Image: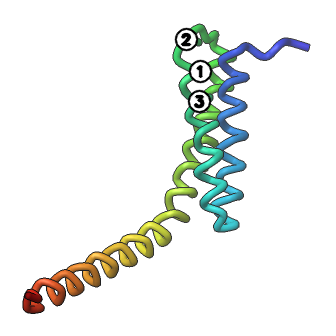
């Protein structure tokens, strides 16, 4: 049995993390998605010093990259409604704050 090259192993780890993040996103567990995304980013950063790939490694990397990108697209699709909801909530809070500031500024100053 051949040993997995370090760069392919790193891509496997990233693919596992993206798969876990997708499952968490499907469960609407966004706090855990964010927490796991830190590990994901760390794993991606560790790819930078690893550069050597032979043709077999390239094929494995291509398969893993396809899976990672598919997971990423599905997570983004799941996150879009949540981001819209949060954006609407922030907009409502800002309007509420503006109304409060307008009313507070129109009251006569006490002497």
Within the image, what quadrant is residue 93 found in?
bottom left
- Does 84 sit above or below residue 49? below
Q: Nearer the viewer, mark 2 or mark 3?
A: 3
Say which residue appears at 73% left-offset and 13% top-offset. Answer: 5
Asked whether the beta carbons under mark 2 and mark 1 sit within 8 Å of each other, the answer is yes
Picture disc at residue 49: 2
Viewer-nearest residue: 29 or 56: 29
Q: How is the image coloured?
A: rainbow
Give the secondary structure at mark 2.
loop
Quadrant placement of the N terminus = top right
Decide: few, some or many residues near mark 3? Use Cα within 10 Å; few <14, some 14-19, many ≥20: few
Give the secondary structure at mark 1.
loop
Position of 85 compared to 6: left or right?
Answer: left
Q: Position of residue 18 (x, y in %)?
A: 65, 44
Asked whether the beta carbons under mark 3 and mark 1 sit within 8 Å of each other, the answer is yes
Give the secondary structure at mark 3.
helix
Q: Position of residue 60 (x, y in %)?
A: 68, 26
Q: Circle 3 is placed at which residue position?
A: 42
Give the mark nearer the N terminus: 2 vs 3.
Answer: 3
- Does 71 sit above or below residue 29? above
Mark 2–mark 3 Cα distance, whole angstroms, equals 13 Å
Say which residue appears at 69% left-offset and 21% top-offset. Answer: 8
């Amino acid at each position: 049995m051949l040993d997995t090259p370090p760069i392919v192993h790193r891509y496997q780890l990233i693919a596992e993390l993206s798969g876990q993040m997708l499952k968490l996103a499907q469960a609407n567990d966004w706090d855990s998605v964010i927490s796991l995304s830190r590990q994901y980013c760390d794993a991606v950063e560790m790819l930078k010093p690893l550069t050597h790939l032979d043709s077999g490694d390239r094929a494995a990397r291509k398969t893993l990259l396809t899976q990672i990108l598919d997971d990423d697209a599905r997570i983004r699709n799941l996150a879009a409604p949540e981001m819209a909801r949060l954006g609407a909530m922030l907009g409502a809070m800002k309007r509420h704050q503006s109304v409060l500031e307008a009313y507070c500024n129109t009251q006569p100053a006490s002497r």
